[in-house]
Image: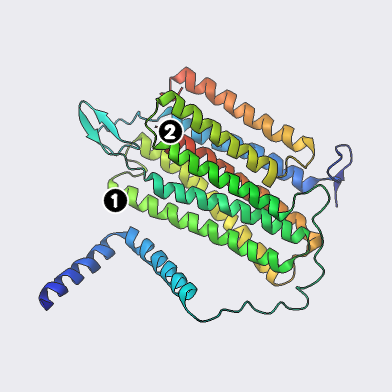
Amino acid sequence: MATVATHQDAHSGPLDNRKLLMWLFLASECLFFGGLIGTYLLYRDRSTDIDGPFAHDTTINGIHYTGIYDIPFTSVSAFVLLMSSVSMVLALAAIQRNDRRGLQVWLACTALLGLTFLAGQAFEFTVFVHEGLTLDENLFGTTFFVLTGFHGAHVSVGVLILLSLFVMAVQGKLTHKQSLNVELAGLYWHFVDVVWIVIFTLVYLIR
Amino acid sequence: MLELLAVVLAESVKSVIEKPSFLIGLPLLGLGAIGVLIALSPIELRWPERPKDLAAEIMPPPPGQPTAQVYIQVGAILAAITALEVAIYYLNIVQGILIAALLALSALKFVLVLLWFMHLRFDTKLFTVLFSGALLGVIALFMVVLVTLGSNFV
């Protein structure tokens, strides 16, 4: 295993290059999602189409427009993704304890929760399109769909990684010695979760 | 009467086909209903026997790492904070306080996941420096952009 011997501390063993690379990747992803969230915030409530759908309840010139966000539904989605992070870390704990059954169960559970989140997002997008909000309808539609769409794409990649790990675990190719693979997948998955924590607050909850 | 029923059924089928959201939602509801029926049925479901190779010796968690129980406790705290966020959203309070409270709770969740689930609390400090450096950089950059271009948010 390739290691960098200069950076060690009391709690960890030798620093693995793959883990370092993953953290560098996640740091760059911070900038990526920061750009998308910043753009959404910049163009919030600046839609040129005054009759177009609004995110939250809005009153313009005495006319009340009902917002299209369904907060109870999105809250459940956020909860599902949060719980998938718990199951992911339990999968890591399982492989570190050499518990192969636990690893398989928690990996499958995480992938299933991820798929549930994606199904919810597909449902939400479909409803929004029926309400008249599309990618090219107005600035709100463009920034919203690009931001949440890219997040959904990241979740989809994560689900594919999880399913690959699950198949490897079932075939017996993922053992205690390869726990770093699960740890790296976990880092990616938790990052996707923390991005949703920010999106849920800044995009959905703050009016 | 039968004619009326036929009309109602035809309209229901038509609305399902016309609205793709139903096409996605109904199978999910169906799956949920099957799950409830299985859970309520008197049939005893048996977990498959654990094969011998899977029953290999279970080891304790690595030194310095939390147990599964601790992870579940952190997950419960995160779920409670999410519930609190949603509850605050529905409170009729001053906009400034609402935003501050939501941002604080969101930051708390963010930090909890980073420290406990992503193991920054237990890993080398280099990862913390890398990630927090990028995070602070992006926050500073976009605060400048949002202030300069005059977003409604800041």
Judged from the image, the secondary structure of the residue bearing numbered disc 1 is helix
Residue found at x 56% / y 49%: A82
Query: What is the secondary structure assignment of the residue under circle 2?
Result: loop
> How many numbered discs, if any?
2
Where is residue B64 shown, x and y percent of the image?
81, 47
| Amino acid, disc 2 | Ile
B140 versus A56 height, above or below: above
Residue at mark 1: A130
Judged from this view, the residue extending furthest toward the top is B148
Which one is earlier in the sequence, the residue at label 1 or at label 2? 1
Position of residue B5 relative to residue A58, above or below, is below
Residue occupying image coordinates x 66% and y 37%: A27
Give the amino acid at mark 1. Answer: His
The answer to whether residue A3 is left or right of residue B52 is right
Q: CA distance from mark 1 to mark 2?
A: 24 Å
Q: Is residue A162 left or right of residue A2?
A: left
Residue A79 position within the rendered picture, expressed as x and y whole percent measured from the top left: 51, 50
Counting from the top left corner in percent of width and height, residue B16 is at 28, 64
Quick check: can you spot residue A192?
no
Chain letter of disc 2?
A
Q: How is the image coloured?
A: rainbow
Q: Which mark is residue A206?
A: 2
Question: Residue A112 in the image: x percent, y percent?
Answer: 54, 62
Disc 1 with disc 2 on a shared chain: yes
Q: Nearer the viewer, mark 1 or mark 2?
A: 2
Q: Is residue A176 left or right of residue B27?
A: right
- Label 2 CA crowd tier, 10 Å (few <14, some 14–19, many 20+): some
Q: Nearer the viewer, residue B59 or A15?
A: B59
Quadrant into which the C terminus of chain A falls: top left
Q: Which quadrant would residue A119 be assigned to in this image?
A: bottom left
